[in-house]
Amino acid sequence: MPRPIMSTGSLNQIDELLRSIGVTSDPSIPVMTETERPAAQASGPAPQAQSAVVQEAPPSSTVRPAAPRRPAPLERSPEPEAPVGRRVVQPFVPKAPTSVEDSGMVASEINDLILKFLLSRAVESGNQIAVQLGLKFGIIESLLRQAKVDRLVVYKNSLAGGDYLYELTDLGRDRARALAEQCTYFGTAPVPLDQYVASVKAQSLEGRKPPLADIRKAFSDLDLSDHLLSNIGQAIHSGRGMFLYGSPGNGKTSMAERVTKSFGDTIWIPRAIAAAGEIIRMFDPNRHKPIRFKENPAIDGRWVLIERPTIVAGGELQMDNLEINYIRKTGIGEAPLQLKANCGTLLIDDFGRQRMSTDELLNRWIVPLE
């Protein structure tokens, strides 16, 4: 699950909710530094807090943006030098499958994508089909040979390197049209749900406790008091959801947007997921920031390297945004906000101003907030 952060200006409303569940903050607890952490761990693991509450900053700690800085470049390899304030950690790198079985798919699913792609292109090379589906040419080539035997495709022309230009037969065209009526998707081959779940476990924020130095760097462009920074650090170390509350315009949203930067690494997400026979589009170019890197044939082309996401939803948030949105016309599902925010942060801004009731929204997040 993503780390949910809720920001609100209704102090009385939040206090009432917190008292009802018996949660309070303790600003006297300092944030452990790197030198203090080993000693603390030696005495045994501390129990995790159920939720973390960051109190309103005192008047002397009003957030003031510092002088503008040049943004760090996005273009880097999977193992780049970490920008200032960031640590690049890659515990998970998707390995390119060498067979249909390794991909987690069945041959018929890949064949369906090939036929629909050729229906849109008329004629295409085997290499380009492999690029489109994000799979190795060897996998696609064997499937195309079988499709030719089944009289679904024909060789239009030969190319260098043992490749061919492929074209649908009348039988293949009829099959492709029938498939497109059910689902129009013919993009990158989807990743099975179990492989995606394994990637989330490997890249999760759970158990990660960034040192105070990294937290300071993440918030370096804001003028925060040590007391407020300590409170934020406690909330980050709790590994749970948090509430940020205070007067309008005091910097709650600015602080929440920088929480993810404390962890500073990049993650891999699939472009699409296959679950229960449905295709769910995962990568969202409007919400995810892809990172270009040098091509590596050992990496699965179905995955995208992105910055650890911070997704913001304000007063426009509706319950439908938290469910998979299936488009009947295309047969493609769109991942909900919390799925797109996995391994990152989901910020619910202006909490209490959504169209749904506060109780309904809190009940939706009862598990990650516990």
Image (tube, helix red, strand yellow):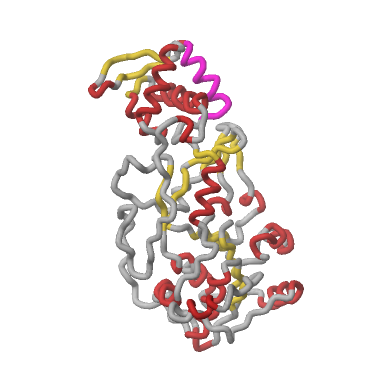
- Which of 369/48 is in front? 48
Q: Where is residue 286 in the image (x, y as percent from the top left)?
A: 46, 51
Count the labels in the image.
0
Q: Which residue is drawn at 70% across and 77% down?
A: 15
Q: Give the range drawn in magenta.
A: 171-184
- Main secondary structure found in the magenta portion: helix
Q: Is residue 276 placed above or below 283 in the rendered structure?
A: above
Q: Horizontally, is 143 left or right of 292 in the view? A: right
Residue farthest along the right direction in this orientation: 20
Q: Horizontally, is 112 left or right of 241 in the view? A: left
- Which of 359/49 is in front? 49
Q: In which quarter of the image is the N terminus?
A: bottom right
- Which of 139/69 is in front? 139
Q: Horizontally, is 293 left or right of 331 in the view? A: left
Question: Is residue 14 in the magenta section?
Answer: no
Q: Which residue is drawn at 58% across and 49% down?
A: 336
Q: Which residue is drawn at 43% across and 80% down?
A: 35
Q: Where is residue 218 in the image (x, y as percent from the top left)?
A: 42, 71
Q: In which quarter of the image is the C terminus?
A: bottom right
Q: Residue at x 34, y 72 (%)?
A: 68
Residue farthest along the bottom direction in this orientation: 60
- Which of 11/107 is in front? 107
Question: Is residue 178 in the magenta section?
Answer: yes
Q: Where is residue 202 in the image (x, y as percent from the top left)?
A: 50, 54
Q: Is residue 294 placed above or below 151 in the rendered structure?
A: below
Q: Is residue 225 placed above or below 45 in the rendered structure?
A: below
Q: Where is residue 237 in the image (x, y as percent from the top left)?
A: 54, 72
Q: Quadrant of residue 17?
A: bottom right
